[in-house]
């Protein structure tokens, strides 16, 4: 039954059609909000766009891109990996792996990593795409691997976490944990900070591991599943975990958001919210999207709401990213929206084709936003004063 809920949710998304003017044919499904006119607060310039394979289609992988230095790396379920120049979109190299690639690529420390539905992990030379090594894990990999301190950390769909040497692929450790029988399609990607690996689990917990050994340091419950059925009791922590200094922020589906002291694992605050998106940090604000398509800003010190914006309700927004003083989200019709971090007001809008944008936009070090659609269309956007 694993992944069943996502398939139901995906069916809802695509049954609404590709025009927000169509009403839902299902009595219990809210149609996406109509897009309304507004006065732009910022100029947005598309630097380039390109097609990078067939994309992920309706698989629900949230397959995004990676940016390292001035290179954008993409991967798709047909097995293609491409490297594009961040400034021009020019293809630098392309490799066909013949694998059903399912994770977003990860790029850091002169290493590029991708993983597949077949449980294969590949490490490549980011300069030319040549394979350095491959390894096998116990199940499909959906979440983006993490690279830190010469180790590659891979979260597997059965709950296991593997660490490999970035140099030769030697397996350093495995952390094993059971999973509920019914979960959302997707996993929280490993978040590595200060020699620790932070993971969100489908049972509603956040776990901290030692990066070097894989030993568990602490576990904290974000939400407890309640209800008569397995569907009612789903409290997956599937979105991005934010680690900033000694504080850890996580949120769950049909549960709550929680701030955790990273040293003692003591909860600092909590508030009810249901999200599959996790958090993006913008100064003193935590930005997220709830399961109804409302964008929220929470005070990182208290968890109280600073503002909320529901004008994009039921548009199945991507997890947010922060570009300068704006939150960037994609939607089910291929639109990219910029919202003011200060008050949540709509600030700009562009359209990248007409296919859904399910992966979080990725922001380069100098503030370029790279967005990819489920059909494999990718574009880069810069803000203009």
Image (cartoon, helix red, strand yellow):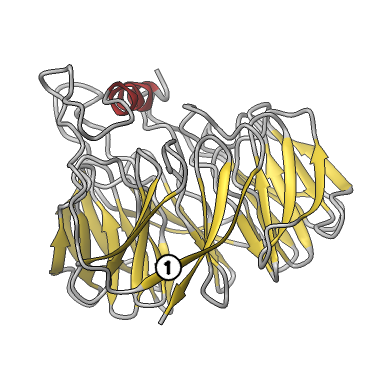
> Left of 71 or right of it: where is 330?
left
- Residue that appears at 44% across and 73% down: 383
Name the quadrant containing residue 26. top left
Which percent across, then down, holds residue 190? 53, 54
Q: List the residue tagged with mark 1.
A: 44
Which percent across, then down, holds residue 313? 18, 45
Q: Relative to 238, does residue 287 appear above or below in the rendering?
A: below
Quadrant that contains the N terminus: top left
Name the quadrant containing residue 117. top right
Residue 264 visible? The answer is no
Q: From the viewer's side, name the closer residue of 373 and 134.
A: 373
Q: Relative to 189, does residue 203 appear above or below in the rendering?
A: above
Q: How many marks?
A: 1
Quick one: label 1, few (<14), some, or many (20+) residues within 10 Å?
some
Q: Relative to 221, does residue 356 appear above or below in the rendering?
A: above
- Residue that appears at 87% across and 52% down: 168
Q: From the viewer's side, name the closer residue of 381 and 291.
A: 381
Q: Residue furthest left?
A: 27
Q: From the viewer's side, name the closer residue of 303 and 354.
A: 354
Quadrant that contains the C terminus: bottom left
Q: Relative to 287, does residue 169 appear above or below in the rendering?
A: above
- Residue that appears at 75% across and 64% down: 150
Name the quadrant containing residue 147. bottom right
What SS does tag 1 mark? Answer: strand
Residue 169 visible? The answer is yes
Which percent across, then down, holds residue 260? 31, 67
Q: From the viewer's side, name the closer residue of 162 and 72.
A: 72
């Amino acid at each position: 039954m694993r992944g069943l809920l996502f398939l139901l949710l995906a069916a809802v998304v695509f049954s609404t059609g590709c025009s927000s003017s169509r009403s839902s044919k299902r009595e219990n499904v809210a149609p996406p909000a109509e897009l309304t006119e507004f006065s732009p607060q910022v100029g947005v310039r598309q630097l380039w766009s390109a097609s990078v394979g067939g994309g992920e289609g309706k698989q629900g992988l949230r397959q995004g891109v990676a940016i390292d230095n001035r290179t954008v790396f993409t991967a798709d379920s047909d097995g293609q990996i491409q490297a594009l120049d961040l400034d021009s979109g020019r293809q630098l190299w392309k490799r066909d792996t013949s694998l059903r690639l399912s994770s977003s690529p990860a790029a850091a420390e002169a290493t590029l990593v991708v993983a597949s539905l077949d449980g294969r992990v590949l490490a490549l030379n980011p300069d030319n795409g040549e394979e350095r090594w491959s390894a096998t894990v116990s199940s499909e990999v959906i979440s983006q691997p993490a690279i830190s301190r010469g180790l590659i950390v891979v979260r597997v769909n059965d709950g296991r976490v593997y660490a490999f040497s970035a140099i030769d692929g030697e397996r350093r450790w495995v952390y094993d944990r059971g999973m509920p029988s019914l979960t959302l399609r997707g996993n929280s990607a490993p978040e590595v900070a200060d020699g620790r690996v932070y993971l969100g689990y489908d049972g509603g917990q956040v776990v901290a591991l030692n990066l070097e050994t894989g030993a568990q340091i602490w576990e904290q419950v974000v939400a407890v599943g309640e209800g008569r059925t397995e569907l009612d009791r789903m409290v997956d922590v599937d979105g991005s975990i934010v680690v900033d200094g000694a504080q850890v922020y996580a949120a769950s589906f049909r549960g709550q958001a929680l701030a955790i002291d990273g040293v003692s694992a003591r909860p600092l605050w909590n508030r009810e919210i249901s999200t599959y998106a996790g958090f993006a940090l913008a100064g003193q604000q935590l930005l997220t999207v709830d399961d109804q398509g409302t964008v929220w800003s929470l005070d990182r010190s208290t968890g109280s709401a600073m503002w909320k914006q529901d004008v994009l309700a039921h548009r199945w927004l991507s997890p947010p990213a922060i570009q300068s003083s704006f939150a960037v989200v994609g939607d089910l019709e291929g639109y990219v929206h910029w919202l003011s971090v200060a008050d949540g007001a709509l600030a700009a809008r562009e359209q990248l084709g007409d296919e859904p944008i399910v992966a979080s936009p990725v922001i380069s070090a100098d503030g370029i936003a790279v967005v990819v659609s489920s059909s494999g269309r990718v574009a880069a956007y810069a803000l203009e004063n």
